[in-house]
Image (cartoon, rainbow, N blue to C red):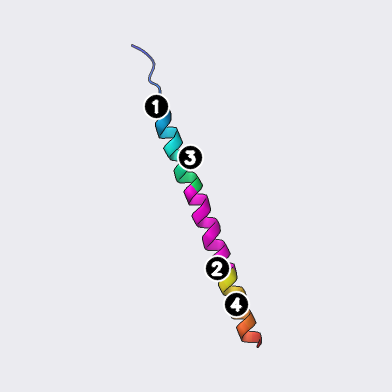
Amino acid sequence: MAPKRKPPTLQQKKEEVNRKAIIWTAASVVGLIIIISALIIIANM
């Protein structure tokens, strides 16, 4: 009757998923900024 312990592999996978999610959100935000700035530059030309 040992206490239930979460395997460390699951925690590592969660961390990997979180890192990927952070990278994706950051990339999408940067992409949106680039697109908006490009549109502003084109509109001002």
Under tag 2, what secondary structure? helix
Task: Give, as a single range, the part of the protein colored magenta.
Answer: 20-33
Read off the residue under disc 3.
15
Residue 21 horizontal side relative to residue 39, left or right: left
- Per the image, label 4 sits on a secondary structure element best described as helix
Please say if 43 is above or below 30.
below
Which residue sits at x=65%, y=88%?
Answer: 45
The alpha-carbon separation of the residues under discs 3 and 1 comes to 13 Å
Instruction: Calculate the distance from the C-alpha at mark 2 to the C-alpha at mark 4.
Output: 10 Å
Pointer 4 or 3: first along the chain: 3
Q: Residues within 10 Å of mark 2 (few under 14, many from 20)?
A: few
Q: How many marks?
A: 4
Image location of residue 36, percent across then percent down: 58, 74
Left or right: 2 in relation to 25: left
Assess whether mark 1 and mark 2 are in contact (beta carbons under 8 angstroms).
no
Q: Is residue 2 above or below residue 35?
A: above
Task: Tell me which amino acid carries mark 3.
Answer: Glu
User: Residue under circle 4?
Assistant: 38
- Kind of residue at badge 4: Ala
Q: Earlier in the sequence, mark 2 or mark 4?
A: 2
Q: Earlier in the sequence, mark 4 or mark 1?
A: 1
Kindly identify the residue that appears in the image at 40 percent across and 22 percent down: 5
Q: Which residue is mark 1?
A: 7
Residue 28 on the magenta span:
yes
As drawn, the residue found furthest toward the right would be 44
